[in-house]
Amino acid sequence: MAKYGCKCGKTLSNSLCPNDIQLKVFTDKQWEQLYEKSFITGDDFPDPEYDVWRCPDCKRIYVFDGTRLIMQYVLETD
């Protein structure tokens, strides 16, 4: 369970399970490998390679490798 301060000021947390902050993101290739192994329940799925969080307010995406932030994305505005 962790917390992270979004640049918009919102405190993000994954302490609730399930939650709307943490995303399960797999590449298409990883998904195909899982599908070929016939995983059926959520408990059978391995953890994704990266931990991906989305701010519900500003929609920024944060990508972590363990506890280290490695990428962040923000929506462009016109």
Image: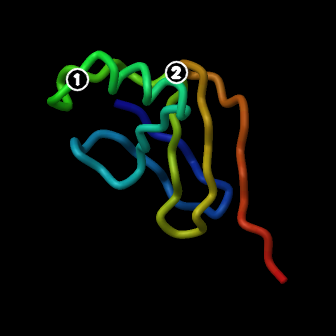
Quarter of the image that includes the C terminus: bottom right
At label 1, which amino acid type do we have? Phe
Q: Total marks drawn?
A: 2
Q: Secondary structure at mark 2?
A: loop
Instruction: Count neighbours of disc 1 (C-alpha within 10 A) and say few if under 14, some if 14 to 19, many if 20 or more.
Output: few
User: Residue at (53%, 34%) from the top-left corner?
Assistant: 28
Location of residue 69 by image quarter: top right
Residue 5 position in % (x across, y down):
57, 48
Q: Secondary structure at mark 1?
A: loop
Label 2–label 1 contact, CB within 8 A? no
Q: Is residue 13 above or below residue 20?
A: above
In space, the residues marked 2 and 1 are separated at their CA atoms by: 17 Å
In the visual, does 69 lie left or right of 48?
right
Most extreme residue toward the bottom, as rendered?
A: 78
Q: Is residue 9 above or below residue 17?
A: below
User: Residue at (46%, 50%) from the top-left corner?
Assistant: 12
In the visual, does 74 lie left or right of 64?
right
Location of residue 38 by image quarter: top left
> In this figure, which residue is indicated by the disc labeled 1?
39
> In this figure, which residue is indicated by the disc labeled 2?
49
Q: Is residue 57 above or below residue 17?
A: below
Residue toward you, 13 or 31: 31
Residue 76 position in % (x across, y down):
79, 70
Residue 2 is marked as none
Most extreme residue toward the right, as rendered?
A: 78
